[in-house]
Image: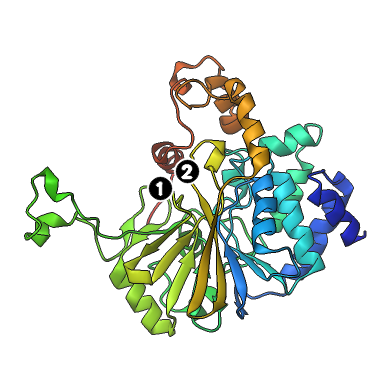
Amino acid sequence: MELDKCLEVLYKGQLLPEVTIRALCFKFKELLIKESNVIHIQTPVTVVGDMHGQFHDLLEMFSIGGRIPDTNYLFLGDYVDRGLYSIETIMLLIVLKLRYPDRIHLLRGNHESRQITQSYGFYTECLNKYGGNTRVWTYLTDAFDYLVLCCIIDNELFCVHGGLSPNVQTIDQIKIIDRFREIPHDGAMADLVWSDPEENELINPENGIDPNNLEEFFKPTSNQFQVSPRGAGYTFGRAVVEKFLESNKMSRIYRAHQLCNDGYQVYFDGLVTTVWSAPNYCYRCGNKASILELYSTNKFYFNVFEEAPENKLLKENFNNIYDDSGRMTSKVINDYFIDDGSDDDDESFRDVDVFSEEYQARSASLRSVQYFL
């Protein structure tokens, strides 16, 4: 199994044989089992947010930020689902990790999960591209169980896919999590990949709100943990962030998990930053993407980029997938995302926007998530 030959095939956007994927996943697990739940790396490094199967944008990102091994990379998770090329995306990253293990590091996102990938595209993509059997999906989702949860850069920058947890006060508590499993519905491991920061939002004073009345000027959000509208994880405020950073002698948190129109978003005066790396998300959202180039702890640059030229060709086929309002047709939802054997003409699916926050929260709630506050 020659890794350089695999890379040559993968950079062309071609699929590897099933037997090769099986062998690569085995070697990948052998490599990752040696790593702690929390890995430590040094700058310079480029931090990458969600990619979601947008393979051509991954290549575009490499052309902008530099290829491995010339550039060090930390990926924050969510490599699969949503996009049309999840297999090509995750296999390229796996082989790069095997070929250059000290140059690329991969964290686990909430979509690196058997349950989520059965609903958001990756499972069906594996069936379609590998003759209708589930073996490739099984090899890859088994490998997901070995991905690490967090990364610390220069001993003071804390990196995670989602956010913080009420079950985690110290980084040492993360180190003892049993990560070699499916992501559970609740608890520390789930929170690390599902949670989101939530900052007080200013209400527009033109709507009749007195800006001198701070109680009315701010929307009623909490500085503490609140149950997330996603149906899993929590939202957390500034007080939670400040306490975690102080207790663990960290200075900032970098995370992904949330779409940002400008490619990144800064919270709490820079204490938390979201990095988003999937431009024109789902080939229709129109957002920019970014990678965070960290030169040292306090010297960094958000390299903002737009979608790859190849993605524009995909839009020509949108009439086969989306209706005039930009929503997936009921047949595509049933066949590609739901895949539950329900009737293709079911009226309940005709107006569903599978990319909306409402749909995500509703589908997550169907998993019967229980919270222990």
| Quadrant occupied by the N terminus | bottom right
- In the image: residue 314, left or right of residue 8: left
Horizontal and vertical percent position of residue 111: 57, 50
* Up-down relation of residue 367 to residue 142 (above or below): above
At x 38% / y 72%, what residue is drawn?
Answer: 271
Badge 2 is on which residue?
367
Name the element at disc 2: loop
3D distance between C-alphas at marks 2 and 1? 8 Å
Q: Quadrant of residue 307?
A: top right
Q: Residues within 10 Å of mark 1 (few under 14, many from 20)?
A: many
Badge 1 is on which residue?
231
* Up-down relation of residue 361 to residue 318 (above or below): below
Identify the disc placed on residue 265: none
| Quadrant occupied by the C terminus | bottom left
Q: Quadrant of residue 13?
A: top right
Horizontal and vertical percent position of residue 363: 46, 38
* Residue positioned most to the top: 345
